[in-house]
């Protein structure tokens, strides 16, 4: 028999195929093995659709009684958009269930496992936990804080500059980096930027990857409603464009609001705070629309505002082997830090080479730890061998 | 028989044991094999001492006639501080010589190989060329430009800051990074910094590595002679302290100059240009004293001045998983760059993990390419098999 950890890592890869399609549901992957042979695979394909376990069960071309189910996340025991998976698992006569991590959602957390055990299914918990937990970090944040998961994307020189003195920045990073950035966009629910970037670059904010075009939500922070009705973000799928603007504009710029709304975009009123629009309000509105995974692509000021408001979760820093010196534009705005002791720590820092550039990834907050802790607590309640 | 490239890489490692001791000589490593068995090893231990080939020959405990000599750099054919190595090689009856790269010094370049061939020695050229060339880049710059080889050392946050707003910087990088920085110091001929760093941190500018203390030259750029006669750089080995100051101070601050000179330090007058002391004059004076390998550890202004004057050759950028934001102090001063097209390229960029930090190394100019080109030209003149 293959190592259960290796099988679980294959389930993790299956799960990732659903990234960008599951809204406020977690991505999940599952496999069914009988006598050590894989007979079914599945992943949660989209919000409201079948869960990964059911997909895997339906994928089997043979009787599955007595088989093993591997699943990255604890099967659900509650009615959501679909009936509880645990009932189907019991009914189908699955003998053993291997669970990657426990569901952080308190509606379920441990209850799914309990139901299976009570109904005579052997359950083993805790396989490839780090990987199983990391693919659902945005879901964990949603459960714990009811806020979107914000990833900051920065393309900078070795000395931390995102543009030259005159604002020019095409291209700091090379094609391989830009292609990878489009992959990250393609698995995000939304791309958020500031009006500064929209006015300067007039971007489409779409994701072009492997010859396909994808359309995450285009989220623009534009407190003074400076956006042009002809901006490129309205070219395709204007209905996926969300503009946050100061509430006062609904009186002062009613005609423009009307024009843009008629073009299909959504304009949401938002209160203005000292440092820009109220990002908590922005977060609430995004969650309402099932937008969890948000890639922040603005300039240094926007990036800093998400850090300052404790909303930033992850960074992607593409770093090119170039320098611009002190006159270049800083990758981050002010973080109100006076002393080195107050610096912000990026944990779990990793670096990958992308042709000539390097991609740093790191976290402001590690939600996977909480999921792993929860899993540790449940691990010992497994069936005895 | 072992792969000659692998044996040559072992010679490269031997050569590096001489780093920091050979002044204007290159580091060189050599091995002697007889019937595929290593019978002698050697490296150029210090300026004026035996060359690596002679060290390896003397290391053999048996008759070496008919043996193979591996050496990272073409053996010398001219009288320098010691007699020509090629004569000894022929006299000792060495049968085959494997040369890593050709000597970039025009006094020798190719002549050593020619002499050996004429005297019946088989010569094979071009093994582990990249490694053999990279360990003598400072020597190549010395030969080509008669200037020291300047490496810029920077310890910064992910967003390119070397200190917080209030100037505090202890410690951005972790202990492992700082230890590695001391290794780099320990194999440098000199550590160069500006008076700003001396006044702010009062550093010793020594190298503490593996329980040993080493004393590269302490080179301070201090145009206004602001240094205190009690500065920590004078504590140990004051005779290895070199201060460059504006020529006018020899009249205006004659008493201070006298005090510091009497303490053992050397003070060198230097003309002042728009952006600080004349770095070409500094370079000439360092070369006169056999100081080739200089580690620049100043603040952003000093680092930028070496880049702006086309003197910077290499960078060591220690990068910590921290951010300070726009109010932090930039790692580089102004490079007079307005547009992205003018950005400076760091080539041959590599990154290594050091505990929590990452070390980038890269080059402004690649001297190894010229050495490898030279080697390519000579390669085909080898003895036929």
Image (spheres, coloured by chain):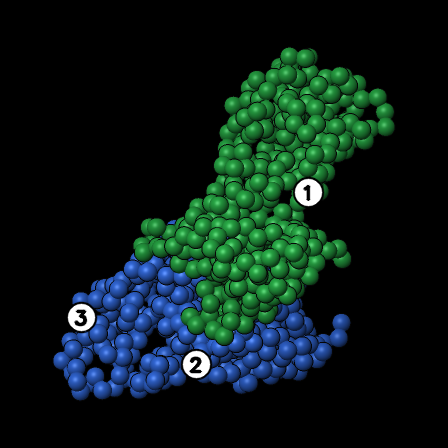
Chain colours: A blue, B green
Q: Looking at the image, is B281 positioned above or below residue B384?
A: below
At numbered mark 2, what does the secondary structure look like: helix, strand or loop?
loop
Q: Residue at x 72, y 25 (%)?
A: B69
Nearer the camera: disc 1 or disc 3: 1
Q: Residue at x 81, y 31 (%)?
A: B59
**Percent of width and height locating residue B378:** 55, 22
- Give residue A309's mark: 2
Q: Is residue A219 left or right of residue B305?
A: left
The residue at which mark 1 appears reads as B21
Chain letter belonging to callout 1: B
Nearer the camera: disc 2 or disc 3: 2
Q: Crowdedness of circle 3 by 10 Å Cα count: few (<14), some, many (20+)?
A: some
The residue at which mark 3 appears reads as A229
- Outermost residue, right direction? B61
Chain letter belonging to callout 2: A
Q: Crowdedness of circle 2 by 10 Å Cα count: few (<14), some, many (20+)?
A: few
Question: Which quarter of the picture shows residue B336?
Answer: bottom left
Question: Which quarter of the picture shows residue A374?
Answer: bottom right
Q: Is residue A269 left or right of residue B250?
A: left
Distance Cα–Cα, label 1 vs label 3: 69 Å
The number of numbered badges drawn on the structure is 3
- Front in this rendered view, residue A184 or B24: B24
């Amino acid at each position: 028999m293959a190592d259960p950890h290796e099988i679980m890592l294959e389930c993790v890869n299956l799960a990732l195929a659903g990234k960008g399609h599951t809204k406020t549901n977690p991505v999940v992957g599952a496999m069914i093995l009988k006598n050590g042979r894989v007979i079914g695979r599945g992943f949660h394909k989209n919000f409201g659709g079948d869960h990964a376990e059911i997909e895997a069960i339906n994928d089997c071309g043979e009787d599955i009684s007595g088989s093993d189910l591997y699943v990255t996340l604890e099967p659900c025991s509650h009615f959501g958009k679909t009936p509880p998976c645990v009932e189907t698992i019991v009914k189908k006569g699955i003998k053993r269930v291997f669970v990657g991590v426990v569901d952080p959602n308190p509606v379920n957390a441990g209850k799914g496992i309990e139901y299976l055990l009570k109904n005579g299914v052997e359950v083993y918990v805790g396989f490839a936990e780090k990987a199983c937990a990391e693919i659902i970090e945005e879901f964990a944040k949603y459960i714990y804080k009811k806020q979107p998961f914000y990833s900051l994307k920065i393309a900078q020189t070795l000395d931390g500059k995102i543009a030259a003195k005159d604002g020019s920045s095409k291209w700091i990073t090379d094609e391989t980096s830009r292609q990878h950035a489009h992959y990250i966009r393609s698995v995000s629910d939304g791309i958020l930027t500031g009006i500064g970037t929209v006015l300067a670059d007039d971007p489409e904010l779409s994701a072009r990857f492997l010859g396909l075009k994808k359309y995450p939500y285009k989220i623009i922070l534009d407190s003074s409603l400076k956006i042009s009705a002809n901006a490129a973000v309205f070219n395709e799928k204007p209905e996926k464009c969300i503009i946050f603007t100061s509430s006062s504009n609904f009186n002062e710029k009613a005609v423009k609001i009307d024009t843009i709304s008629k073009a299909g975009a959504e304009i949401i009123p938002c209160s203005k705070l000292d440092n820009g629009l109220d990002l908590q309000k922005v977060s609430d509105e995004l969650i309402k629309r099932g937008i969890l995974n948000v890639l922040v692509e603005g300039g240094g000021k926007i990036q800093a505002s998400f850090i300052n408001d404790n909303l930033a979760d992850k960074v992607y820093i593409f770093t090119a082997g170039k320098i611009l010196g002190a006159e270049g534009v800083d990758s981050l705005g002010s973080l109100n830090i006076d002393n080195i002791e107050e610096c912000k720590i990026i944990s779990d820092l990793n670096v990958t080479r992308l042709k000539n550039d390097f991609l740093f990834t790191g976290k402001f907050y590690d939600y996977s730890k909480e999921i792993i802790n929860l899993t540790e607590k449940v691990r010992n309640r497994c069936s005895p061998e």
